[in-house]
Amino acid sequence: MKKITLVLLLLISSMFLFPAPSSAKWWLFGKSGGEVGIAYLYLNNMSYEEAGRKAVLFKESMADGLIHIKGKAAVGKGTIGSVRVTVDNKENWQEAKLADNGTFEFSFKPDIDKSYVFYIEATDTAGKVNDVEATRKEVVVSQQNFTQAVKEALDKMIAAYAAEDPSAFMALVSEDFSGDKVMLDRAIRSDFSVFDNIQLTYAINAVVADAKGRIAVSIQFNRSVVSSKSGSALTDRGTTEFIFSMGEKGPQVYSMKNPLIFGLSDAQNVAQGTVQSTTNGPTLVVGSTGDAQTLPFKDAISFINNGGSTTTPPESGTVTLTQRNIVNDFDTLEFSSGSVQGEAGLHPVTGDIGAKCACNHPLIIFKDGMKHKDLGAGSIDSITEVPDESTYSGGDDINIAEDEIFALYLPNGKYALFRVSSSTFIAAPCGPGGCSNPAHIVMQYKYQPDGSKNFN
């Protein structure tokens, strides 16, 4: 009993000899299990981090006229005890509304055009605090209409682009540009070597501030340029979209969509998405070799997706088609697969074209719905583009000579080429029913799977 009394006396005296620190009250709630941090943080529904070092809020986008800070403080195994906010560079601190799970809210009514310096301090029940300096944010509320601010930014971009001033243009592009900012810079400079006399006019269709505080802008544009290579005047029009992020320098471009009005020389890497068109009108594009042209909208998007090429390379091959001893037993070629199949009957069933003899000359038999056009004798590789199908004839069976090239418009809407390079027949009289001996016809072919007329 004397020992217990002595221990109690020593404990009581130690409380007077070693006074508790001012934050001792936090220990009443238990120890911290790790560092205190901010799990997420928003400034008027915009990511606090993405808002930049200095954020500009527009009065017209603040429905209730308040600045709202929302977030969640967290700590390993402990509990958040308080969250405080200062809006005047630490001169005064105010308590935020805190929930048990660490979420907090703070709101106040700002003065227009006044600068506020924010810090957020979260403290756990063990007295540990977050990295307060990392939460610093300068915020200004502008009375300026953000639609007008975006228009001014677009006007500056167009002026810099028309003046071929890449530095002035890139100053209006956000540091967190969603594409590759270096590639955009290169594409802009390349545009200046591709185009002369750049003229752009536009009208704003819509301006919408999104949940992240970015501004989505839809515009209708008209454009005319002169191709530096060909000297040709090129014009197009269309609808496109931008997203701007708001920073201390005002609106800056965060992303752009096809059809681009800037950076066409590398549209595949610059554009983030496509604004679909219902008109399929002419759209300006720049090829991988720096050639400018206009294409129908759908072809232009395919051109961009193919890295500046209007088509994919054509498929090609050489096949031997055989007519066997039975008069109507012959091989057919299917262009899409390059496969050769035997057929029985007057016309091919599964293949696109068949070949058999007709008195020692190749007779080409077409699938129903096929159209053809004679391009004359020559090398099949010399044909870089076939004529439009509107100039073709119906698919009646025809006799052809060796080296003769035909363009075909297939029932599936694709184009093909073929040329008979050689034919071998066993000499035998021909009668009304055809030949009775085998024939071997060697045929070169090309097939364009993307539906274009290009065979380059």
Image: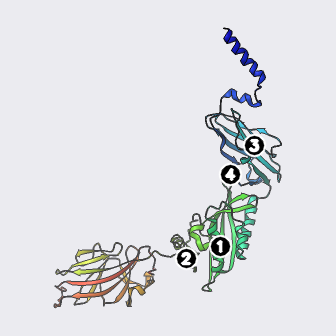
Reading the image, the residue beneath label 4 is 49
Q: Position of residue 112 (x, y in %)?
A: 82, 52
- Quadrant containing the N terminus in the rendered view: top right
Mark 4, secondary structure of its residue: loop
Q: Is residue 347 visible?
A: no
Q: Do residues under tags 4 and 2 come within 8 Å of each other at their CB atoms?
A: no
Reading the image, the residue beneath label 1 is 188
The amino acid at mark 3 is Ser
Quarter location, residue 330: bottom left
- The residue drawn where x is 50% and y is 76% is 310
Reading the image, the residue beneath label 3 is 107
The amino acid at mark 4 is Glu
For marks 1 and 4 on the same chain, the one whose residue lies earlier in the sequence: 4
Query: How far separated are the C-alphas under marks 2 and 3?
Result: 53 Å
For marks 3 and 1 on the same chain, the one whose residue lies earlier in the sequence: 3
Of the two numbered discs 3 and 1 in the rendering, the one whose residue sits closer to the viewer? 1
